[in-house]
Amino acid sequence: MAIDTGILINVGFYVSFSIVFAMLALGFNLQWGYTGLFNAGIAGFFLIGAYTATIAITPPTPPSNGYPGHLGGYELPIAAGAILAMLVSGLAAIAIALPTLRLRADYLAIATLAFAEVVRTVAINLEPVTAGTIGIVSIPRLFTFSGTNAALFTTGTVVGVGAVIILVLFVVLHFILESPWGRVLRAVREDEEATMAVGKNTFWFKLQVFAIGGALMGLAGWFFVMALPYLEPTGDFAPAVTFSIWVMVIVGGAGNLKGSIAGAFLVYGLEWSSVQLKDFAPDALSPSIPYIRLMIVGALLIVLIIYRPEGILREKKRVLR
Amino acid sequence: MAISHEPESLSAWTAARRGRGLFHLTRRTRRQLLRGGVACLAFVGLNALLAALFGVNILNYTIAGLSVSSIVIVAAIGLTLIYGIRGFANFAHGDIMALGAYVALFVNLNGLSLIWGTIAAFAVLALFGILFEVVIFSRLEGRGPVPPIVASVGLGLIIQNGIRTLATTRPWLYPVPAYSDIPIAPGLGVNPIRHILTPAIGLLFVVSAHVLLTYTNLGKAMRATADNLELAKATGIDTKRVTYATWAISCSFASTAGILLGLTSFLQPEMGLNILLLIFAAVIVGGIGSPWGAVLGGLVIGLSQEMSAPLFIWLGQPDVIGLVNASAYKVAIPFIILIVVLILRPWGIAGRPPAFVSRVYFVERITRAILSGTTKAEQTDGNDGG
Amino acid sequence: MNASAGTPPILSVQRVRKSFGGIRAVDDCSLSINAQSITGLIGPNGAGKSTLFNIIAGLYRPDAGAIWLAGRRIDGLPPYEIVHRGLTKTWQIPHELRNLTVLENLLLGAKRNSGEHLLNVLLQWAAVRSDEKQWRARAREVLRLTELDGLANEHAKALSGGQKKLLELARALMTDPAIVLLDEPVAGVNPRLAGNLMDLIERLRRGGRTFFLIEHDMNVVMNRCDRVIVMHQGNAIAEGTPASVKANPLVIESYLGG
């Protein structure tokens, strides 16, 4: 049966990366949509997770001809890579949060943006550890296959694992956000001073949220290298990624978990389809298509924030019995 | 020139200044000048010490720092004015700088000299600034600090990718001859464009800004509006016109800074985003809303970045740490300073601590609670640098 | 400044000072509140009353002085700790949590809700559910007390001004406070509702709670308070029964002159 596996693999990539962004979006939604913490350093936690996982699971790679080598050689199981990624990103989130959570929203944004850029600068330049801009290749995959349909099965398994993870994340997050704990978060978002005055240690709650969000972004970093076994710091961890996540969460609706996942698929779908369109567009236009797409994203951000800041899908009213 | 935080009414404030000659210095200004003088002397002393210890060519870094500072200062003045009047961090400011640089390039490539390009960019960006306010930011008034940030990010995306679409991603250079360094001491060279022209233009803009804000009616109206919007409206200032003027000035300053940046390095679509954090750092370190703070902050940021390079290079030597790509880490220094300032003194050098230093720096909440229905003694200036 | 026979005051403010940018909002202020009393705090605008309340509640740190609650010092403690120790403050302008329902607003006041700890949510779900059920029952009681029961599932932003004031009080009551600081509890509330509210406060006082309220409505102050304290320019200048305070020449001068 001659299925065009190429198309399937392509779609598989779309789904995998959408899941990566969905994880990032869930983490950010938890921080901003539910608790009002405006994190502009999403890319930083994403990067930390990706590199932690990679360093943990790759075989030893000493410097060789023209290749700076990178830290590694622990060859831990892939699941351990995921857990370490979450742990290290979560700890980084706590480290950043302790001094900055008490800042008001715009200062927090600038501080986290600065953090993400510092992290990215380090990743670019600390070549003995990260192999710099040349990047790390041949990252171990979740499952390896051989034979004619190896690529298809590889992508398929990545999608499968990703789908399971996203489902589990959604269920767990939904559960904890509907609990009294989640209620305090929403109260902090509404009016932090009033919540303090009613007897809640709001700083502690914000810290927990920032850590969990950071850990989720770290997990996204792990899944990113599962989807694409090549890691380099310049393009995929630039501030533009952070801004894309903002769009996804705003589109999907602050405080709406399903919306974040949908927003991720939608907005990344724009990017993916623009890349597909490139082949069909007239030559003069085609190199500009990614940029035109980004301009549309920018315009979307502006229009949404002016006219529909709560997002396209609304947060539901909670009726308690 | 710092945006005043004395919570008096505008008429009282102008009355206090009435009858003062051009060069009368208030006690506060005298104190500030004294502090500034001491800081300058200390800085010169530091450089003398460094030169004595490591040789004259270490001053190359200081000179480079002054050049970077000049660019940052011009951009930071623009950013801080908008921050003070509209109350949000304009994340598109870097891309506005890039836009100015590319407009000048366009003019230049079409036959006119770069000077005309600069003037054209100045005017065009001023108009754009007003356009941004009319189309986007006026609709976000009163919605807090986050929505305008999000909108400015969208705007930056549009500008940056518009540039990519029209001018491609290849790096451009201004067709200006490459002047060689003028040696002023063995090992110490001064580049006419980077180290003479750039600081000169920077100084020109700083002085112009000072004159504008201190001695013109528009400038006074801008300061009053940034200080307290409601009060300014109540005393009859056309705050809409003032806001447009501020946007125009902010964007035209940004355009000139962008041209300087293009002159001292090269033009690429990301050039604005790359320098944006430096400018934020300068504004915050210096104190939001304060143009002189922007000058101080710009100096701190530019000088600290460049003067840390030799330290990193030393660390990069194989017998110390062997840090690879050592000098590239210098860009981390301004960010670290920014984070430290945000933690310890968020209102910056020239700002005043918010009157209500409550547990949570949620200035908006407090101002809202206070300004609706209480009186003078319990009222404070909520629009301060915090 | 004298406590009633033998019992120490439940709240004692000693020489508290607070300045904002050169303005002395609270200037060497001392006062004390007896348990199970309804004490009024009056004074011309700008006297520093709300600021004092914010300091007592822990939202601002005093520059100097000490504050004692039931014999233990509370100045410098964070607000949530002070609420825990039995002192809750309401806001002059209601700080209702707009996009939460009335019931959720109240539930937030629950002092020991195991569901607010993440580990419990994940591992002790049965305990969380039973705690939540208990607190919901309590919340409904409080809603009945404050006549808000029909509005349990309305978003707080849909409430009228007077209802928001009631919500403030209800939410404070949920924290089971020994003493409640009320900042203008009946300002802007219609007289019938105001009367009901003050009746409720009287009932709660008989049940053991203490109330300390800032009010401008002289009716309320004169008829409902046991004692009245007068503040002027950051200082407590007079105190005593409503009648004696009304006749005090210092007080009259502060209102006329200040």
Image (cartoon, coloured by chain):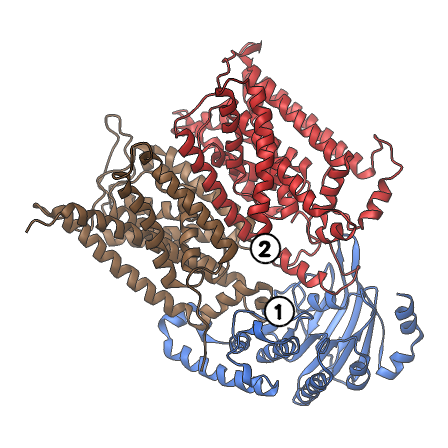
Chain colours: A brown, B red, C blue
The dot on residue B144 is: 2
Q: Is residue B11 left or right of residue A295?
A: right
Residue B72 seen in the current view? no
Which of the two residues, C128 or A312, is positioned nearer the viewer here?
A312
Quadrant where the C terminus of chain A sits is: bottom left
Chain for numbered disc 1: C
User: Is C105 located above or below residue B59 in the figure?
Assistant: below
Q: Is residue B142 left or right of residue C2?
A: left
Crowd band around label 2 with a 10 angstrom C-alpha radius: few (<14), some (14–19), many (20+): some
Crowd band around label 1 with a 10 angstrom C-alpha radius: few (<14), some (14–19), many (20+): many
Question: What residue appears at the point 83 percent right and 64 percent down from the top-left corner?
Answer: C233
User: Is B123 located above or below residue A55 in the figure?
Assistant: above
Tag 1 residue? C95
Secondary structure under badge 1? loop
Task: Check disc 2 and give the amino acid type.
Answer: Gly
Q: Is residue A31 left or right of residue B253?
A: left
